[in-house]
Image (spheres, rainbow, N blue to C red):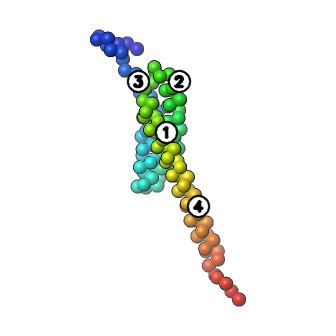
Amino acid sequence: MTADPWGHPAPIPQHPLANRSMILGLIGLCGFFVLLVPVLLSPFAWYYGTVARREIDRAPAQWSNRSEATTGLVCGIIGTALLALAVIVGALIVGSLALLLTFEGGYSS
């Protein structure tokens, strides 16, 4: 890295996956409370955050933005947990409705 004429070191470039992870994590987490569709982005945020943090830890002089990668990772984990919870609740509701409709006739003599 080259320094400027005053001797300051050049800034370390930001890791591209760190920013992507944070954006996807925040969209997925906030989108869960507005519309359930954006929460599908949360597993991608978890993955990108993990990859970015691993690459930043391997080469700290090459990449920056570990905090953004961590933010995306945490939001991705929370969003993925909410997604799993929504799938379980949805399956219970569908199963309950199917069971209710199966026994709709009641008792017959």
Mark 3, residue position:
13
Asked if marks 2 and 1 touch (Cβ < 8 Å), the reply is no
Label located before the other in sequence (4 or 1): 1
Label located before the other in sequence (2 or 1): 2
Mark 4, residue position:
91
Q: On the rendered structure, is 109 left or right of 29?
A: right
Q: CA distance from mark 2 to mark 3?
A: 15 Å
- Disc 4 vs disc 1: which is toward the camera? 1
Asked if marks 4 and 3 touch (Cβ < 8 Å), the reply is no
Within 10 Å of disc 3 (Cα), the crowding (few <14, some 14-19, many 20+) is few
Q: Which mark, residue 73? A: 1
Within 10 Å of disc 4 (Cα), the crowding (few <14, some 14-19, many 20+) is few
Q: Amino acid at mark 1?
A: Leu
Residue at point 37% right, 21% down? Answer: 11
Q: Secondary structure at mark 3?
A: loop
Vertical order, 3 against 88 (above or below) = above
Q: Position of residue 35 (x, y in %)?
A: 43, 55
Mark 2, residue position:
58
